Amino acid sequence: MDQAALTGESLAVTMTEGDSPKMGSTVVRGEVDATVVFTGKDSFFGKTAAMLSGPEEVSNLQRLLIKIMGILVALSLTLCSYTFYYLISEGEEVRMALSFTVVLLIASIPVAIEIVCTTTLALGSHQLSEQGAIVSRLPAIEDLAGMTILCSDKTGTLTMNKMMIQEETPVYTKGETQYSILRYAAMAAKWRDPPRDALDTLVLGAVDLPSMETVTQTDFMPFDPTVKRTAGTVTEKGKSFTVTKGAPNIILTLCSNAAVKQQCEADVTRLGRRGIRAIAVAKTNAKGGYDMLGLLTFLDPPRPDTKATIHKAIGYGVAVKMITGDHLLIAQETARQLDMGDDMRTVDGLPMLDEDGNPPPNLKDFADLILPADGFAGVFPEHKFLIVETLRSIGHKTGMTGDGVNDAPALKRADVGIAVQGATDAARAAADIVLTQPGLSTIVDAIFISRVIFQRMKNFLTYRIAATLQLLVFFFIAVLKMHPKVDYYDKHDMSGHPEVEQYPAFFHMPVLMLMLITLLNDGTLISIGYDTVNASPLPQRWNLPVLFTIAGALGFVALVSSLLILHVGLDSWNPEGFFQWATGLRVGLHYGQITTMMYLKVSISDFLTLFSARTLDGPFWSSMPSPILLGAAFTALSISTALAILWPAEYPDGIETEGMGLHKPHHLAALVWAYCVGCWFVQDAFKLLVVATLTRFNVFGINDSVSEAMEKEELKSGRKAATLTTGAKKGYQAV
């Protein structure tokens, strides 16, 4: 039976009475009477189609962004609602209070968060395509960065999908070599005609056919399933003899040397235990009997780069499991050559779909069987599907490679489904990533690139949370606790300065300024998709408590610095205040200059916060930003600075504004810049202190790898965590 449509293995298997060939298999030799047991959706093909029709899941990244947005929106609505209530209770006009509150709400909600993340993923997908990995589902890049287990098909992915003669060639006749035996094997075929079967293809592809011109074939016996061998009678250099090749046990019956028989049988048994196939070659001697020449061994060999690629993947903290439909012995031999571990198992004990095509409800109970294994042999599509489902059920980000219809359900179900080069249309349609180059090496390169992309998104989200908290809480405190008219104008009796307009009851910016902060900063942050970052050597995971803690630390320093400079600006007419003492001037700032000063301060702090957020494990100068990000920051800050200096004196929305360069001191913008840069160093130092504290005491599991975090979750749930494969543990230890 050829079961390639189900298992992906091209070599046929022998079935006898009582076996159950599956729909989609082909009878390639022999004849059979059989009873149809299942049809339609109840057949293996039907179950495969049903597994492909499952609902689309919300991606992990989408769930994360929804959670972050939910937290920030809830905080914004709470603070803005209280701000609106406070303004109304203080006698502010409803229109004015409502316009300010609504604009503050819009400015504080990170509406660009999904746009920037999607753009970063899109730019990353372009980078992956240059490496030979076409991404069909953008969130799969984030899943790839956190992938802990890669279930790989054997044939065509780990191996060449091409039977080749192996170096190991047992020889039983003195003077013969591997090549001479290959040449004799070719004489037992029609070497001048196209190969008739896989064995002829194997042999004739390894022989120098021009050297066969001196050989004349006078008779030929084609392959017959009843005799299981071929034979050719040839003449070479005036000598005529017959050569035969076929199954070792059949060829041995033609030979009379008992010692050779015993040795050959031992070799066949030894090779069979390793999953290596062999054909025997014999030729007639002068007495007309057959002499056994030797055994030709053949196997689908691993790709030249597969072993190094697997070790590289393990070094990245990704365990690689072989999931194949081939025989257990062949899987074990392939695993031995690739150093993938020796714990290869059959499908015995694996979960199965029920009569309705549903997985068992207790999938986690199979984790102790699946997780420690280095691979499984003899699997069918539903086994692959349920292996992936079990690994996902215990928290592992699971990747699956495949190329056939039989792999499609598992490809669709995996967190990262990967269709290898030459995959069928069904496999490509079900996969998240399609490879255009052979082997696994592209996947390992893609893992590294995906972790770079993950780090860019992590840096951006840290910044975006910090900027939102800074802006929102700043205006909340400024409105409630800092009253320009009562606390500053009336207190210092500024009525003696007719050039100074009356301060408003509460501090607020024009709508236009708030919108410019959002547009200039968020608009240019798309450039973060090109940023230079250091990728993690281990699988990545989102840790929201850590993310919010670090973002809160960055936002806290920016918030305090904004409140301080606002206080200094409002208190600038105080003869005993810090402003006049520090500048040596005897005049203060117009309220319009204070609003533009705060606009510039918030704009500068926002971008400087980004540069601190992109290097969480070191000072901001430990990693050089990309030229594109620097260019975007320079452009946005230049525009903000120019607007703050040259803003015309006007009253938009009843709020006075005035460029900082229109009246003394003319160097106010430079002072704001110097102040922001100084606060930036303080902010970065505070960030390092917070990160060091979290790391030292492992607060929120900041030091935990993905595997350790999952083990803790399993223990919390009262269930003993299943262990990783030995190879994966070595990989984690190496990192």
Image: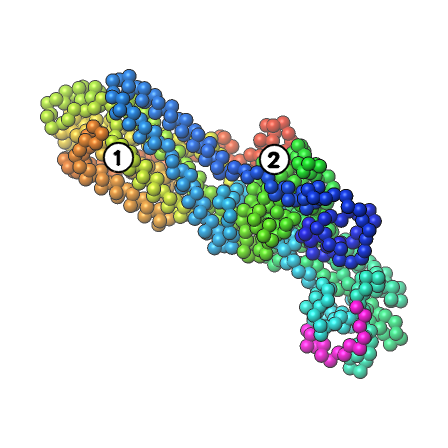
Residue 356 drawn at (x, y percent): 68, 36
- Relative to 112, is 24 on the left or the right? right
Looking at the image, the residue that sits furthest to the bottom is: 238
Badge 2 is on which residue? 394
Q: Quadrant of the N terminus?
A: bottom right
Q: Which mark is residue 184?
A: none
Specify start and end residues of the magenta stretch as a single range: 208-222
- Relative to 279, is 72 on the left or the right? left
Residue 165 drawn at (x, y percent): 70, 64
Residue ID at (54%, 46%): 432
Residue 301 drawn at (x, y percent): 66, 58
Q: Quadrant of the C terminus?
A: top right
SS state under label 1: helix
Report the Cα–Cα distance between label 2 and label 1: 50 Å
Q: Nearer the viewer, mark 2 or mark 1?
A: 1
Find out whether residue 217 is within the magenta segment.
yes
Residue ID at (69%, 56%): 10
Residue 160's place in the image compared with 605, above or below, is below
Residue 646's place in the image compared with 16, above or below, is above
Q: Nearer the viewer, residue 296 or 65?
A: 65
Three-letter amino acid code of the residue under disc 2: Ile
Badge 1 is on which residue? 512
Three-letter amino acid code of the residue under disc 1: Leu
